[in-house]
Amino acid sequence: MTDSHHISRRDFIKLATIVGGGVIGTIIGIPGLVYLLDPALKSEQGETWISLGPLENFEIGKPTLVTFVRSRVNGWEKTSSSYGVFVLRKSETDVVVFSNLCTHLHCRVNWVEEKRAFVCPCHDAAFDIDGNVLGGPPPRPLDRYEGEHAKIEDGVIKILFKEG
């Protein structure tokens, strides 16, 4: 007596359909799943070097506002934010870069030439040309980009900008 496993034609077709459907579903499903989940798994770099422009574009002794836009992707949401800094060229090679955000409530400060001061429109805060507090409620001087956070490379001023 032989012990053979006999499978009917109907069972074979069912099995082949299930296996074939599973293989096709896997081939289509895995890339589709990766496509859907990939944006949520990506991590954004929190810092990058921002070029502010050639050194010769900045007049010695006069703070100059430079603005730039950064886009951030969070999953499927993309947001763009505008930022600004003041570049103060003190001499041919000495440059200081200040954030344009008041250290009190992060309102944007403006350089007022007549007062020779950075003035915050929100709460009458004022900062001198070196970013030090002249008056008002700010708890500290304007934030600076200096040291390893600022450089002049090939005649171009750059800052290491950190998001947030």
Image (cartoon, rainbow, N blue to C red):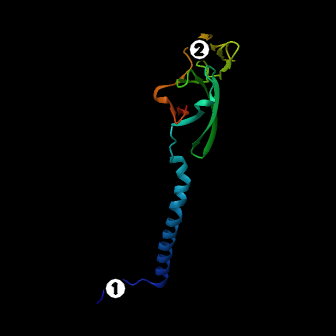
Mark 2–mark 1 Cα distance, whole angstroms, equals 89 Å
Residue in the foreground of this view, choosing between 28 and 120? 120
Quarter of the picture containing the N terminus is bottom left
Label 1 Cα neighbours within 10 Å, binned few <14 / some 14-19 / many ≥20: few
Q: Secondary structure at mark 1?
A: loop
Q: Amino acid at mark 1?
A: Ser
Q: Which residue occupies the extreme front position in the image?
A: 92
- Indicate the position of residue 115 as horizontal and vertical percent values: 68, 12
Q: Amino acid at mark 2?
A: Pro
- Indicate the position of residue 8 as horizontal and vertical percent values: 45, 84
Q: Which mark is residue 4?
A: 1
**Precedes in sequence: disc 2 or disc 1:** 1
Q: Is residue 121 left or right of residue 20?
A: right
Label 2 Cα neighbours within 10 Å, binned few <14 / some 14-19 / many ≥20: many
Which quarter of the picture shows residue 4?
bottom left
Circle 2 is placed at which residue position? Answer: 138
